Image (spheres, rainbow, N blue to C red):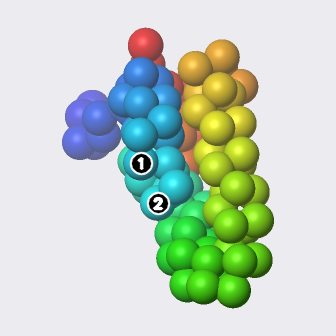
């Protein structure tokens, strides 16, 4: 039975994380909307806080978070999407 679900691709998720991960796009793609919203809001707040220097620290933290998620996607540490379906190669 076809429920209209398209499996998410690991390569697409990893590339989204590498190139636009600071905005949580890879998490939205995978269905992890809460993490995606946290990354978007955190990134924009960090840009605003860059006016008083502390934002750079937060941006660095988010960048590390995104890099770790990208590595986990490519290495197989993140194996399922937000609905529990496995990622395809």
Which sits in the foreground, 71 or 58? Answer: 58
- Image quarter for residue 69? top right
Decide which of 69, 44 is in the foreground and name it: 44
User: Which image quadrant is residue 54 in?
Assistant: bottom right
Q: Position of residue 4 (x, y in %)?
A: 23, 42
Q: Which mark is residue 36?
A: none
Q: Is residue 65 left or right of residue 11?
A: right
- What residue do we see at 68% from left, 67% from top? 56
The residue where tag 2 is placed is: 23
Q: Name the residue that disc number 1 marks.
A: 20
Q: Residues within 10 Å of mark 1 (few under 14, many from 20)?
A: few
Inspect this view and state whether residue 29 appears. yes
Q: Answer yes or no: do the residues labelled 2 and 1 have beta carbons within 8 Å? A: yes
Q: What secondary structure is marked by label 1?
A: helix
Alpha-carbon span between mark 2 and mark 1: 6 Å
Q: Could one spot residue 45 in this view of the protein?
A: no
From the viewer's side, name the closer residue of 50 and 76. Answer: 50
Residue at horizontal 53 percent and vertical 62 percent from the top: 36
Residue in the picture at 46% in, 24% down: 10
Mark 2: few/some/many CA within 10 Å (<14, 14-19, 20+): many
Residue 78: x, y in percent? 65, 31
Q: Position of residue 85 (x, y in %)?
A: 51, 34
């Amino acid at each position: 039975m076809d429920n209209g679900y398209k499996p998410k691709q690991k390569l697409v998720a990893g590339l989204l994380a590498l190139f636009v991960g600071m905005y949580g796009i890879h998490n939205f793609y995978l269905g992890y909307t809460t993490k995606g919203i946290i990354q978007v809001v955190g990134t924009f707040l960090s840009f605003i806080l860059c006016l008083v220097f502390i934002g750079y620290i937060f941006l660095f933290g988010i960048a590390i978070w995104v890099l770790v998620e990208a590595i986990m996607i490519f290495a197989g540490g993140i194996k399922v999407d937000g609905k529990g379906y496995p990622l395809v190669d």
